[in-house]
Image (cartoon, rainbow, N blue to C red):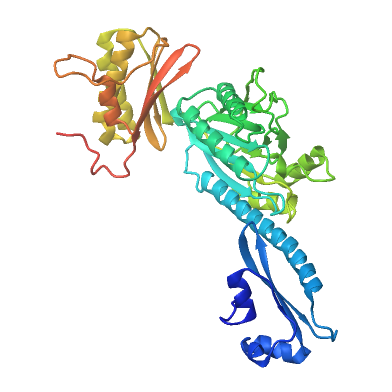
């Protein structure tokens, strides 16, 4: 509470020194506020001690001691005892204050680094939860993400940094940023974990407070319905089949935790039926004091069982069923229900390595866009296809494949058998070529390259306008 100027508490707080009032006079009693004066009168207090609560050079408050039963007034021995007591209490109060501030800062940092809203993707619908640990346990380093990839695919990632507090939250932020960068490179899941492993080793060598981490990385393709997994010491994901049965993918090679180094990561693939729910979680969901992990997994399976549950409702059910009010560890949970793209949403042709066939590729594109009702994108798509197919014929080797995907955006892909990397460069005024990829970059909302065993694929995405106005081809 606030203290009034002129009172003994105010003098003690301002000067930082203890006050011993053995027999306060009437003027000193009169300085107290009405509420305090009433208590002094009710209990017949006759002696006071005012002791500052100081810790680490800061005065946190003032403790008031009043004697009313014992007729003997306070003396210097009583004051020394009170000062020792207040010194210890002040350190405890300051420690609690500092811990609370660090805990709140860590939680705020972690929440700011986690995605607040996962955009809609044609490949999946998703729901997620992040539940921090109880205040005494400290904030942790759990995180999750859903990231778009080329070809209408999505990457699902979940991880857990060892330890708690600001260090764990900061390391989590660095790992999540690295995952975003590696996802843009369109690396395979095992390669992503290899790069993250190297990063954690460097952070450990820098003494950045990193004690290791676990991670699960999955890539789902809505065209082939193939999901590719790789994990680094992380609990296996669960699958909820469309009929409601639950399966844990224990056959995914576990791999070592991030930061161990020296051991390769392996991938595992699974075809997923449309409507399958993929469940990614951190160990805080299935681990609890006095309970085995197997028992936690059984409880999780029981919460997941049942067909057709809305994902938000399923998240709430899992949190209510499995998690106590005072959680010893924080929890990240990510649910994703898979969708597939219909055959009529994908068109694919194999082209001969012949410059005369570029016009044929444009004609195929024009007819397909007419069938999809995407005539406003015909002009820009023909330009993109012309440049990509021409570059494949000129600089790569066969076979050349043209694929169009009609999802939330129009995706144009040209694949060839070369591993040479395309480069975007600025052509000079007198140069006859070198403007192809620059033109593609200007026309597309996103573009890039991904590599596979048989070569590479250059892709470009265009936003599908809801109305033709503003998207029509120039005259």
Residue 193 on image: x %, y %: 59, 25
| Residue 242 visible | no
| Residue 181 visible | yes
Residue 138 on image: x %, y %: 67, 49
State the residue lying farthest toward the front: 76
Quadrant location of the N terminus? Answer: bottom right
Of residue 253 and residue 176, the one placed in the foreground of this image is: 176
Say how many tags the image has. 0
Q: Which corner quadrant of the image does residue 70 belong to?
A: bottom right
Left or right of 328 on screen, residue 420:
left
User: Residue at (53%, 42%) from the top-left corner?
Assistant: 125
Of residue 236 and residue 106, the one placed in the foreground of this image is: 106
Residue 378 on image: x %, y %: 26, 30
Of residue 88 and residue 469, the one placed in the foreground of this image is: 88
Quadrant location of the C terminus? Answer: top left
Q: Which corner quadrant of the image does residue 159 belong to?
A: top right
Q: Which corner quadrant of the image does residue 429 belong to?
A: top left
Q: Is residue 259 above or below residue 325?
A: above
Left or right of 364 on screen, residue 10:
right
Residue 413 on image: x %, y %: 38, 23
């Amino acid at each position: 509470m606030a203290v009034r100027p002129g009172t003994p508490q105010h003098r003690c707080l301002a000067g930082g020194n203890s006050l011993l009032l053995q027999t306060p006079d009437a003027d000193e009693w009169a300085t107290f506020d009405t509420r305090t004066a009433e208590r002094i009168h009710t209990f017949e207090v006759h002696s006071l001690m005012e002791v500052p609560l100081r810790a680490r050079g800061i005065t946190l408050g003032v403790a008031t001691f009043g004697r009313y039963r014992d007729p003997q007034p306070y003396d210097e021995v009583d004051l020394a005892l009170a000062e020792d007591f207040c010194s210890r209490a002040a350190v405890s109060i300051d420690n609690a204050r500092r811990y609370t501030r660090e805990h709140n800062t860590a939680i705020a940092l972690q929440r700011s680094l986690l995605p607040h809203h996962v955009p809609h993707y044609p490949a999946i619908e998703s729901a997620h939860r992040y539940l921090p640990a109880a205040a005494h346990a400290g904030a942790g380093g759990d995180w999750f993400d859903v990231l778009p990839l080329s070809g209408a695919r999505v990457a699902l990632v979940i991880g857990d940094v060892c330890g708690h507090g600001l260090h764990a939250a900061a390391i989590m932020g660095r790992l999540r940023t690295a995952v975003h960068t590696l996802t843009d490179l369109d690396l395979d899941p095992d390669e992503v974990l290899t790069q993250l492993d190297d990063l954690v080793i460097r952070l450990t060598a820098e003494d950045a407070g990193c004690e290791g981490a676990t991670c699960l990385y999955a890539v789902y393709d809505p065209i082939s319905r193939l999901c590719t997994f790789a994990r680094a010491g992380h609990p296996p994901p669960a699958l909820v089949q469309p009929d409601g049965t639950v399966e844990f993918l224990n056959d995914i090679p576990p791999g070592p935790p991030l930061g161990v180094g020296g051991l390769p990561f392996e991938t595992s693939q699974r075809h997923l039926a449309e409507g399958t729910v993929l469940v990614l979680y951190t160990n805080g969901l299935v681990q609890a004091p006095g309970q085995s992990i197997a028992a936690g997994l059984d409880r999780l399976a029981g919460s997941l069982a049942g067909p057709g549950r809305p994902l938000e409702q399923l998240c709430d059910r899992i949190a209510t069923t499995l998690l106590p009010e005072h959680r010893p560890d924080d929890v990240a949970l990510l649910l994703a229900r898979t969708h597939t793209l219909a055959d009529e949403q994908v068109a694919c042709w194999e082209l001969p390595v012949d410059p005369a066939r570029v016009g044929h590729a444009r004609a195929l594109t024009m007819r397909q866009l007419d069938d999809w009702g995407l005539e406003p994108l015909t002009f820009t798509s023909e330009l993109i296809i012309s440049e990509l197919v021409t570059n494949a014929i000129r600089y790569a080797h066969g076979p050349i494949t043209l694929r169009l995907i009609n999802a939330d955006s129009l995706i144009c892909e040209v694949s060839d058998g070369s591993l040479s990397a395309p480069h975007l460069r600025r052509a000079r005024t007198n140069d006859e070529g070198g403007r192809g990829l620059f033109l593609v970059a200007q026309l597309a909302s996103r573009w890039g390259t991904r590599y596979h065993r048989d070569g590479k694929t250059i892709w470009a995405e265009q936003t599908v306008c809801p109305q033709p106005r503003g998207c029509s081809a120039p005259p």
